[in-house]
Structure formats: structure tokens, C-alpha cells
Image: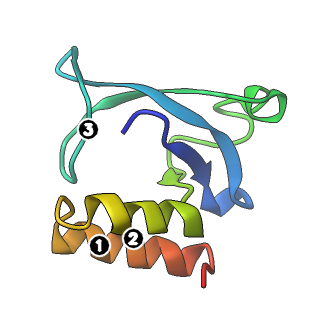
Amino acid sequence: MFGTPICVPERDFIDIGRIVSIENNHKPVDIAKKGQKVAIKIVGTNPEEQQKMFGRHFELEDELVSHISRKSIDVLKANYRDDLSVEEWKLVVTLKRLFKIQ
């Protein structure tokens, strides 16, 4: 989803930017689901993120994840509770544990 902050857990949770576009088969899409192969464009939104470079600060093998927060989880619950599948809610719980969110 556009605007989603992305980080690399294996590299001390460095933030690398936010998603600004997603493409599937060279066509713009709003979201990507598990199993889809898509291209995403990530742009640094502050000077620290803008200095992060592919190949230097993170690699192809590194897993990129949404950098969620308590606030973003609360927004999901309040506004998108019925839009997310059970599998997507399980992912939220996994990310919540990863980021040690109470």
C-alpha cells in the first residue's frame, strides 16, 4: 500500500523509505497480496533514509517488512478490521512480535 514505511529487520531494523508505487506486469496497482511478484518503488522520506543504498546497507536476500507501530495497528483495527483476511491479521501479529509492540 502506498506510503507504507519499509524496514530491514536483519540490518538492525533500518528504515529505508516508503512505498510510492507498486507494479504488476508493468501495470500500476494499489496493493500486492502474498504470492504475487510485483515491483515496488521505495523512496527515502528523510535524509537518513535517503542515504540507505541497495548493495551497501541491505541486499537482495534481506527481507523487507512494513514498519508497523501501535498507532498503525490501532488504525487497522478501527478502519480495516473486516477488510483484512485471517492470514493478514496473523501477519500483523507476527510483525507486532517482531517489533515488540505491546
Mark 1, Cα crowd under 10 Å, few <14 / some 14-19 / many 20+, is some
Q: Does 22 sit above or below residue 67?
A: above
Residue type of the residue flagged with mark 3 = Ile
The reply to whether discs 1 and 2 touch (Cβ–Cβ < 8 Å) is: yes
Q: Which mark is residue 10?
A: none
Which one is earlier in the sequence, the residue at label 3 or at label 1?
3
Q: Secondary structure at mark 3?
A: loop
Image quadrant holding the N terminus, namely top left
Picture coordinates of residue 12, whole percent (x, y): 74, 61
Q: Secondary structure at mark 2?
A: helix
Residue 91 lies left or right of residue 13; in this view the side is left
Picture coordinates of residue 23, whole percent (x, y): 27, 23
Q: Secondary structure at mark 1?
A: helix
Nearer-the-camera pick, 36 or 46: 46
- The residue that label 1 is drawn on is 89
Picture coordinates of residue 53, whole percent (x, y): 71, 29
Q: For the point 66% across and 39% down, which residue is it?
A: 16
- The residue that label 3 is drawn on is 31
- The residue that label 2 is drawn on is 92
Q: For the point 61% across and 50% down, which residue is it?
A: 7
Nearer-the-camera pick, 80 or 102: 80
How far apart are the alpha carbons under marks 3 and 2?
16 Å
